[in-house]
Image (cartoon, rainbow, N blue to C red):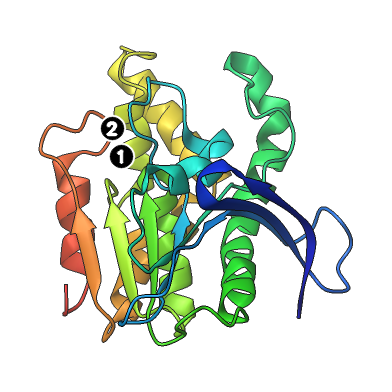
Amino acid sequence: MVAVTDTANASGGYQSVTVRARGVAPGWYYAKGVVRTAPTYNEGKLASVRDQSVRGRTRRGEGGATNGKEAASLVGDPQGLLVASLSYPVYGNDRATGLAVIPEVPAFRRAIWDTPPAVTLALDYLLARPDVDTTRVELCGASFGVPFAAVVGARDPRVTRVWLVQGGADPRAMIEAGLHEEIPFAPARALVASLANVLASGPRFDPARWVGRISPRPVVMINTEQDERIPRASAEQLHAAARDPK
């Protein structure tokens, strides 16, 4: 059971919603996001939960954990669809850098583990709405959201199609690619990436571990060839791990 604890209407047809699991203490298993609706078309409604969809025109270092719920604003005319976007459960100082990150590791780890339940909770809320077609539910994860979309898509049969945008397998390799400018010395970069991968539960949330379980429901993957943070090998490995239809 879910309980809507806060709603607020915003401009442009958006509604900000905070949902918590009924009977659970505040701060645990909550989903906070934005829902956009549109007039009904002949084909009915579609609930699309966009877990941390990428922001347009985002500068390096922005977006991510603090801006996920704004992804719904990137959608133009929904044309009869219901679109929802989520923010990550954020604990601790999410802007910590350098050595200040070390004491925040437990909070970061908790946020990672709480994200799939938050997406599931959002699904519970959306599928209980009378304006949602429960037979057409699509889940989209972009960039850092790809692992969570793969996990939820694999575990929740209510999702009828999964979109993985700018993602890849092998989190350690992707972390190392993202540290290329910050740590030019390759051996040190590899060591830091390996440690960060373990602390962030990278092996557990590797999307290649989950994506094959989404079948026989379809998976759509979108990647670019010149991505500085997602090595081509990681993207190809994730595609190979998925089963048809893909």
Q: Looking at the image, is 102 positioned above or below residue 53?
A: above
Q: Position of residue 184 (x, y in %)?
A: 31, 12
Label 1 secondary element: helix
Q: Residues within 10 Å of mark 1 (few under 14, many from 20)?
A: some
Please, what is the three-letter code of the amino acid marked with disc 1?
Ala
Camera-side residue of 1 and 185: 1
Please, what is the three-letter code of the amino acid marked with disc 2? Arg
Q: Which residue is mark 2?
A: 229
Measuring from the top left, give residue 148's x and y in whole percent.
47, 59
Which is closer to the viewer, label 2 or label 1? 2
Please indicate, yes or no, whether residue 206 appears anywhere in the rendered image. no
Which SS class for mark 2?
Answer: loop
Q: Earlier in the sequence, mark 2 or mark 1?
A: 1
Quarter of the image that includes the N terminus: bottom right
Question: Can you identify the residue that label 1 sits on?
Answer: 173
Please tell me which residue is depicted at 34% across the width and 27% down the height of the picture: 178
Quadrant that contains the C terminus: bottom left
Q: Is residue 56 visible?
A: yes
The quadrant in which residue 143 appears is top left
Could you tell me residue 80's position as x and y percent? 37, 69
Label 2, label 1: how far apart the Cα atoms are:
9 Å
Residue 230 locus on image (x, y percent)? 25, 39
